[in-house]
Amino acid sequence: MRQPFLTAQPHAHVRFCRAIERRALGLAEDAARELPNLPLEDLLQLVHLYAERGSPKYEKAALRWLVRYLSEGTPSLKDVAKVTASLAKRHEREPSGDFPDRG
């Protein structure tokens, strides 16, 4: 029986998850570029990583995430306000590494 060919390079989503776990922003961005349909939950982790690093990409990424959140689901107005306030609050913080948990 012939074995399927496996590459040494992990799938882009696996690399993305590992990069997020390790808080490796550049590696997470590289993997995300290879994943055109990255789930909202994963994208939000990248947005939070931008905030943690004080990245100038944070606001634009947060706004893009919010637009996608609104277009892909049917959140209540209360949920939209809560999520928007949370994103704005993260943006106001200094990148000191002491951000609250995402849960």
Image (tube, helix red, strand yellow):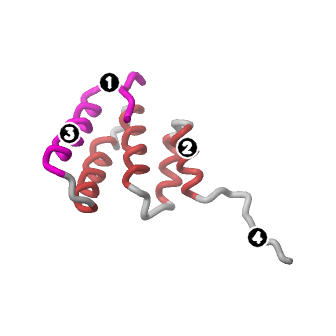
What crowding class fits label 1: few (fewer than 14 Cα within 10 Å), some (14-19), or many (20 or more)?
few
The correct choice, above or below, for 56 with respect to 8 in the image is: above
What's drawn in magenta, residue-wise? 76-103
Q: Which mark is residue 19?
A: 2
Seen at 68% across and 57% down, the residue is: 9
Residue 37 in picture, x, y percent from top left: 42, 63
Picture disc at residue 82: 3
Q: Which residue is mark 4?
A: 5
- Residue drawn at (61%, 59%), measured in percent from left and top? 11
Q: CA distance from mark 4 to mark 3?
A: 47 Å
SS at circle 2: helix
Q: CA distance from mark 4 to mark 1?
A: 47 Å
Q: Are marks 2 and 4 in contact (CB under 8 Å)?
A: no
Q: Amino acid at mark 4?
A: Phe
In front of the other: label 2 or label 1? 2
Decide: marks 2, 1 in contact (CB < 8 A)? no
Q: Is residue 74 left or right of residue 54?
A: left
Q: Foreground: 24 or 57?
A: 24
- The residue singled out by tag 1 in the image is 94
The residue drawn where x is 54% and y is 47% is 17
Image quarter for residue 36? bottom left
Name which of mark 2 and mark 4 comes first in the sequence.
4
Q: Compare marks 4 and 1 and give the one earlier in the sequence.
A: 4
